[in-house]
Image (tube, rainbow, N blue to C red):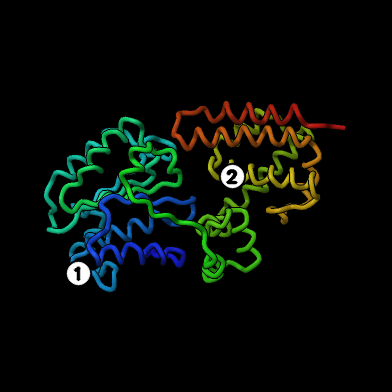
Amino acid sequence: MQIYPWHESQWQQVSSRLQQLTLPHSLLLIGPQGLGKFAFAYELAQRLLCLTPKDNHACGHCRSCDLMQAETHPDYLLIEPEETGKAIKIDKIRRLIDFQQKTSQQGGAQVVLIHGAEAMNRASANALLKSLEEPQGTTYFLLVTSHPHSLPATVRSRCQMLRFSPQSQAIDWLLKEGVDAQRAEHCLRVCEGAPLSALALAQDAEGDLRGDILADMQGLVSQSLDPLSVAEKWKNWPQGALMAWLMSIINDMVTIQVSGKISRHSDHKAALQGLSSCLAPGHWFALNDQLIQQKRLTDSHIALNILLFWEDFLLSMSSAIERP
């Protein structure tokens, strides 16, 4: 079961609607990344398909639960991009329509879970509309997205929204996961309160990415590295993490110049203080604007030349550096 502490309110909502037989056939789960929305949707899918639910959860032992655990349930369909950054094409929605028109093989509900729903292109979203308007029998649609405004208004209007947001339970949960208090607070601050993102930062190699970014920026300042070689390296790094770190690092650079304080990356204080004075605030803002625009394009699943972007970004930064 993957109901995290900050999911309890939402789970109570859907459980109550299930008991009253008023659960909408189309739910749109929205909220920032790192909150476990997919885990919630999957748990709800198991509950909807379970033949002998117990205490508002799937029993975990019936034939339906066994099929879900084996990832072979005939009445469950997961739709998501084939690769990160790719679109959900119309062929997958046509498969959904065929699935919806079939009779439930287990004699209960059918569930379609669309993970990364914002990745649907226009043709896919339009093809989905009729299914959302006229769900067949006991078919439920669970759409999961961190970018609801990237979905057409026609899709959003046909779903009832279930909102997720960072909660105060996050710090206690991280402590139970073995993260020490100081590290937990720091990671939550950097990840804007998203517990799962904070845990990933605390546990895996992404946490070391900041040091690599700062080292490369220092190399550009000292001219021991050139922008094109750094761009070649950065294009192979995890792009979401890289852009998020850069934006938060730039935020600290500007904060240092304005107030002398560091809001997020105090564990890299010396490097940040040394770098912050190398560019005027206006140049830092311009670089941040480039990152925001690139992130919007990435979130919209537009095909991009990542190497070209980083070359342009790093050349802009290098040319703006104020050297003695």
The answer to whether 208 is drawn above or below residue 124 in the figure is: below
Which residue matches tag 1? 52
**Residue farthest to the right, as pictured:** 324
> Which quadrant is home to the C terminus?
top right
Residue in the foreground of this view, choosing between 133 and 234: 133
In what element is the residue under mark 1?
Answer: loop
- At label 1, the amino acid type is Thr
- At label 2, the amino acid type is Ala
| Separation of residues labelled 1 and 2 (CA atoms) | 43 Å
In percent of the image, x 27 and y 58: which residue is there?
A: 23
Q: Residues within 10 Å of mark 2 (few under 14, many from 20)?
A: some
Residue in the foreground of this view, choosing between 221 and 26: 26
> Which quadrant is home to the N terminus?
bottom left
Which residue matches tag 2? 244
Residue 321 can be seen, yes or no: yes
The percent coordinates of residue 70 (x first, y second) are 25, 58
Q: How many marks?
A: 2
